[in-house]
Structure formats: structure tokens, C-alpha cells
């Protein structure tokens, strides 16, 4: 179950019109560990050509957003070991194109200081900024 402003989101029809994807936060409630990421709602899929034709067919397919919890390995491990009820999935913001989605994800990752906070399990931003590379001023 996804929540957006305390409202349950069950389908794409419950989202703003022309939504491309969303920024989300998944919280493992027993330990309050969080993960912040982005999810695309639909993608283009290429199918083989019909008999007698050469051009591949393109169809729009809904992504696995309804059952998605995150791409981080720790989230996947926690899902295997625990109940889905132990997770709270929250949509923070909707995006309306690919560039907007990446911008919003980056904005929220820096805004919430996920690399500096023990609360978040995110370990990098854009594959360029890593938790392990941050200089700790307290040491």
C-alpha cells in the first residue's frame, strides 16, 4: 500500500494526471530505517514484429510500482526475512518526465542528507557521491 499525503494510492488513476513517476520513502518500522528513491510508472517495451512485418512493435507497459519496495540490497533482504506489514511506503512527490524525476530524487536525497544520516540506508547519490567517501568532521 502506497500513501500520498495520508491518502491510499491503489492505481495510476489515483495519481495526478500525466504522472511519469514518483519519489518515495520506504520505512522499515521496527528499526525506523529508511530508503529514499524514485520509481517510474510506465515504460516502453519492444515486442517482436507481427508475422510478415519487419518493424518491432512498441507498447506501453505499467511498471511493478504497486509491489515495489526499493532497489537497495538491505531492503530486499529485510523483505525476505519480514512481513510486508513492517514497511511503510510513502510517495513524497510526483514527477512528470524523466529529467524532472531525476532532479527531484537528487534534490530530496541532498535535502534529507541521506548520506550523513544514520536513519537512511542510501549509500550513494547518482553513483557519484558515496557515504564512504564523506569526510567525518568529528574524527
Image (cartoon, rainbow, N blue to C red):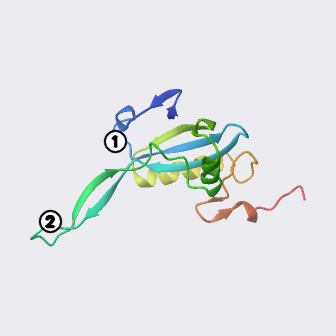
Q: Nearer the viewer, residue 46 or 36?
A: 46
Dot 2 or dot 1: first in sequence order is 1
Q: Secondary structure at mark 2?
A: loop
Q: Residue at 54% of width from left, 43% of height from top?
A: 24
Residue 16 % position (x, y): 38, 35
Residue 57 % position (x, y): 21, 63
Residue 37 % position (x, y): 56, 50
Q: Is residue 40 above or below residue 94?
A: below
* Image quadrant in which the C terminus is located: bottom right
Q: Residue at 46% of width from left, 41% of height from top?
A: 94
- Residue 99 falls left or right of residue 33: left
Q: Which residue is mark 1?
A: 18
Residue 23 % position (x, y): 52, 45
Label 2 Cα neighbours within 10 Å, binned few <14 / some 14-19 / many ≥20? few
* Residue 96: quadrant of the picture: top left
Q: Is residue 5 above or below residue 124?
A: above
Total count of labels:
2
* Residue 115: quadrant of the picture: bottom right
Q: Secondary structure at mark 1?
A: loop
Label 1 Cα neighbours within 10 Å, binned few <14 / some 14-19 / many ≥20? few
- Residue 111 falls left or right of residue 89: right
Q: Nearer the viewer, residue 11 or 128?
A: 11
Q: Which residue is mark 2?
A: 50
* Residue 59: quadrant of the picture: bottom left
The residue mark sitting in front, 2 or 1, is: 2
Which numbered disc covers residue 57? Answer: none
Amino acid at each position: 500500500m502506497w500513501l500520498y499525503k495520508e491518502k491510499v494510492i491503489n492505481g495510476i488513476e489515483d495519481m495526478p494526471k500525466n504522472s511519469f513517476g514518483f519519489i518515495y520513502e520506504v520505512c522499515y518500522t521496527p528499526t525506523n530505517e529508511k530508503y529514499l528513491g524514485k520509481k517510474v510508472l510506465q515504460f516502453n517495451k519492444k515486442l517482436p514484429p507481427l508475422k510478415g512485418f519487419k518493424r518491432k512493435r512498441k507498447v506501453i507497459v505499467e511498471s511493478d510500482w504497486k509491489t515495489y519496495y526499493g532497489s537497495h540490497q538491505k531492503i530486499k533482504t529485510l523483505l525476505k526475512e519480514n512481513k510486508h506489514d513492517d514497511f511503510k511506503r510513502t510517495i513524497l512527490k510526483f514527477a512528470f518526465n524523466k529529467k524532472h524525476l531525476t532532479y527531484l530524487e537528487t534534490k530530496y536525497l541532498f535535502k534529507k542528507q541521506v548520506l550523513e544520516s544514520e536513519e537512511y540506508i542510501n549509500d550513494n547519490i547518482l553513483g557519484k557521491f558515496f557515504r564512504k567517501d564523506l569526510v567525518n568532521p568529528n574524527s
